[in-house]
Amino acid sequence: MSITYTETKSDTDSRTEIDIGDGLMLNINISGEGIIMEVVADLPVHDQGAVVPIPKGEGVRTHLGTIGGPVDEWASWILEREDSE
């Protein structure tokens, strides 16, 4: 697993990418509006039939799912889970 801090615009706006293995990446976006997490996959491709040739060994990023919400809703969700255990 590797963690890459891809962008920090300010104290309240950042983007982090975590390689979780098997070609999957977890992207975490934190802003003043909330926290959004998405899973993407790097799918290996070849350049046959591509509009723009893709170098051998490179991939195409495919979005697999997203979840997000305001920071206070995340905090409430965590506290509810703690109470149920």
Image (cartoon, rainbow, N blue to C red):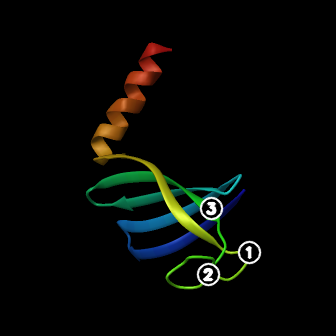
Q: Residue 47 location in percent, x, y?
A: 63, 78
Badge 1 density bin: few <14, some 14–19, many ≥20, Cα 10 Å: few
Compared to residue 65, the image places residue 7 above or below, namely: below
Q: Residue at x 38, y 53 (%)?
A: 36
Q: Residues within 10 Å of mark 3 (few under 14, many from 20)?
A: few
Evaluate if marks 2 and 1 touch, with contact meaning CB atoms under 8 Å apart.
no
- The amino acid type, in three-letter code, at marker 1 is Gly
Q: Where in the figure is residue 17, as x and y percent of width and height?
A: 56, 63
Q: Secondary structure at mark 2?
A: loop
Task: Identify the residue at horizontal 51%, vertical 60% (top origin).
Answer: 62
Q: Nearer the viewer, residue 83 or 70?
A: 70
Three-letter code, disc 3: Leu
Left or right: 1 with respect to 18? right
Q: Nearer the viewer, residue 84 or 46?
A: 46
Is 7 drawn above or below residue 28 in the view shown? below
Disc marking residue 54: 2
Percent of width and height locating residue 78: 42, 31
Splitting the image into 4 quarters, where does residue 77 fall?
A: top left
User: Mark 1 or mark 3, which has the lower sequence index?
Assistant: 3
Residue situated furthest front in the rendering = 49
Amino acid, disc 2: Ile
Q: Which residue is mark 1?
A: 57
- How far apart marks 2 and 1 lie (CA) works out to 9 Å
Q: CA distance from mark 1 to mark 3?
A: 10 Å
What residue do we see at 71% from left, 53% from top? 21
The quarter of the picture where residue 19 lies is bottom right
For mark 3, what is the residue? Answer: 43
